[in-house]
Amino acid sequence: MDGNSRNRFSARAAAEIMAQILRLANGAAFSDGLNPAQWSALRYLADAVPEARTVTAFAQYHATTSGTASQTISALVRKKLVERRPEADDRRRHRLELTSTGYDLLKSDPLGSIAVAIAAQPAEIQDALAKGLEATLRTLMRS
């Protein structure tokens, strides 16, 4: 097997492992009455700077339409996990904030077990994984 064949096999094997991890994550992401997009929104709102806690910013981050992002956020508002707060300078615009219930629910985030598994790896593996996944995501987003 030449070097190129070995690299293609390695890339294919890595993609298969990634698919298995994604299946585990997606299966776990239908928990506590939420779907994967709703979990993603909770994570986003917990980590975003205040100025980026809008439906539009979440839609861009989640690579979806504003309408789809709005439906996701509306479901979280109905579940009392997120509040819409009017902006002080423009009352037509709203900033999104997690409620205390939303923050409490994030403690059982289904991605937690994956984060724990990654954190259990040596620092150099964690660093290589983060860099490799970031580069892969950038490549996919350019496609």
Image (tube, rainbow, N blue to C red):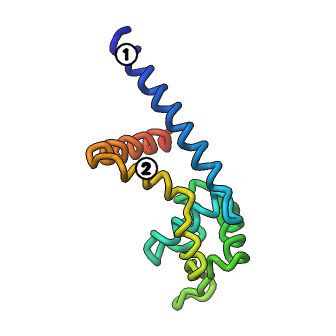
Relative to 17, say whether 120 is above or below.
below
Task: Return the mark for residue 141.
Answer: none
Amino acid tagged 1: Asn
Q: What residue is drawn where x is 60% and y is 88%?
A: 91
Relative to 128, say whether 53 is above or below.
below
User: Relative to 113, is 135 on the left or the right?
Assistant: left
Q: Secondary structure at mark 2?
A: helix
User: Relative to 34, is 122 on the left or the right?
Assistant: left
Kindly indicate the quadrant of the structure image that contains residue 3.
top left
Q: Disc 2, disc 1: CB below 8 Å?
A: no
- The residue that label 2 is drawn on is 117
Residue 66 appears anywhere in the view:
no
Q: Give the image location of residue 87, x and y in percent.
A: 55, 86
Q: Give the image location of residue 93, x and y in percent.
A: 60, 81
Q: Secondary structure at mark 1?
A: helix
User: Relative to 131, is 59 on the left or the right?
Assistant: right
Q: Earlier in the sequence, mark 2 or mark 1?
A: 1
Relative to 67, say whether 123 is above or below.
above
Q: Residues within 10 Å of mark 2 (few under 14, many from 20)?
A: few
| Viewer-nearest residue: 87 or 121 | 121
Q: Quadrant of the N terminus?
A: top left
Q: What residue is drawn where x is 54% and y is 69%?
A: 106
Residue 71 appears anywhere in the view:
yes
- The residue that label 1 is drawn on is 4
Q: What residue is drawn where x is 68% and y is 68%?
A: 70
